[in-house]
């Protein structure tokens, strides 16, 4: 699955905190810093849609 992420704040510290947090998530296999609507495009590997919803709600959405 691919997930587009848009950061609320773009300070150097906020970007670094997000990048550190995302590298600690084993479900995220690739991270791309992009431009346009989203700031990052994450490639996420999970078993199914309910597993993605759990990942998004409980892990990704709670990241800095």
Image (cartoon, grey):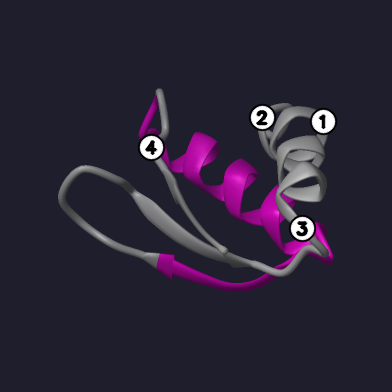
Q: Nearer the viewer, mark 4 or mark 1?
A: 1
User: Outermost residue, left direction?
Assistant: 36
Residue 58, numbered label: 1
Residue at 20% x, 43% y: name it.
Answer: 37
Foreground mark, 3 or 1, reads 3
Number of residues whose C-alpha sits closer than 10 Å to that of mark 2, classed few (under 14), some (14–19) or many (20 or more): few
Residue 24, label in figure: none
Residues at discs 1 and 2 in contact (Cβ within 8 Å):
yes
Tell me the tag on residue 6: 4
Q: Is residue 13 left or right of residue 32?
A: right
N-terminal label among 4 and 1: 4
Q: Earlier in the sequence, mark 3 or mark 1?
A: 3
Q: Which residues are magenta?
A: 9-32
User: Quick check: 4 left or right of 24?
Assistant: left
The residue wearing badge 2 is 61
Q: Residues within 10 Å of mark 4 (few under 14, many from 20)?
A: some
Give the residue at x 72% y 69%.
45
Q: Give how far across and how far down residue 30 sits, in percent.
A: 58, 76
Image marks 3 and 4: residues in contact by CB distance under 8 Å: no
């Amino acid at each position: 699955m691919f997930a587009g992420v848009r950061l609320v704040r773009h300070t150097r510290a906020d970007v670094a905190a997000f990048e550190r947090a995302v590298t600690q998530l084993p479900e995220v296999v690739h991270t791309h810093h992009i431009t346009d609507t989203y700031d990052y495009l994450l490639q996420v590997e999970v078993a199914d849609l309910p597993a993605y919803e759990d990942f998004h709600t409980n892990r990704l959405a709670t990241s800095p």
